[in-house]
Amino acid sequence: MHTHYDVLGVSWKANDDQIRAAFRRSVKTCHPDLHAGDRNAERKLREVLAAYEILRKPQRKAIYDRLLRAERSARVQRFVLTAFTGPGLISPDLANGALTLYLCRPLSRTEYLLGKISVLVITLSWITWVPGLVLFFVQASLSGRQWLIDNAWLAGAILWGSLIWVFVLALLSLTLSAWVKWRVVAGALLLGVLFFGAGFARAINAVLRTQHGYLIDISKLVSIVWQDLFRDTADLPLSVMEAWVALLAIAAFCLYLLMRKIRVNEVVR
């Protein structure tokens, strides 16, 4: 997440003097007198002014810091909640033969899966885009109407970026839940896919001297899409198109595995 500290180029532990010095340094780099007619410089200057307006006032800075800590905590909660909730959604139905009972009713596999996915989507929404939009509107109330007008696109980026993460995590957890009977093992595998996949991707990059190892790093792929949504595409290890194609391929593979596993006779309406 691009914060006011990132805009000024300081640590969140920076004191008032460091913030003030960073503000002056940032203003000099994008001042209109040095960049006449440069819209990017004008936008950057507005961001710098908005960031300093928050961070220079202790009360506003304290509120902003609390919101940032809440957002960072939500990241951890997102993974933990998915690991504990997702794997238990389908495996008990398969282990106990409940799918036959579900699908002997006028209920298709698609409807069954949508119902299971909706559980995770609704649950994860409360710790992803909902607090993200709350943070956005709190920031808007602190920075004023002009900041809201200039940065309204951020609300869409927060919403769509969070929903991409939610759906990727939901599909992964349901797929593992369908193929692994033991809930604890499925949860461990989910964390393994996310974290060990990232380590394996870095190993491939180091050995083959390439960046395409990130194609198997789901967290990195989502991060690249996020950077594109937030208009920060500098120094991307892969193109945005490659990240989208890889994510869509992973989603399609998960859906294929789910449809293969959830196969019982359906009642035709």
Image: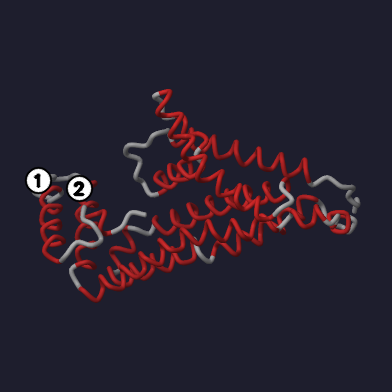
- The residue lying toward the viewer, choosing from 91 and 7, is 91
141, above or below 177, in the image: below
- The residue that label 1 is drawn on is 34
Q: Can you give x and y, in whole percent of width and height, for residue 162 in the image?
A: 50, 55
Front one among 55 and 13: 13
Judging by the rendered image, the residue that carries numbered circle 2 is 41
Residue 257 position by quadrant: top right
Residue 21, by quadrant, is: bottom left
Q: Amino acid at mark 2?
A: Ala
The residue that appears at 46% across and 63% down in the rendered structure is: 74
- Element under disc 2: helix
Query: What residue is rendered at 44% in x and 57% in y?
Result: 158
x%, y% of residue 172?
62, 47
| Residues at circles 2 and 1 in contact by the CB criterion of under 8 Å | yes
Residue pictured at 69% horizontal, 43% vertical: 255
- Dividing the picture into quadrants, the one containing residue 155 is bottom left
* CA gap, disc 2 and disc 1: 9 Å
Residue 123 rendering spot, x and y as whole percentages:
59, 64
Q: Quadrant of the N terminus?
A: bottom left
Q: Amino acid at mark 1?
A: Leu
Q: Residue furthest top?
A: 208
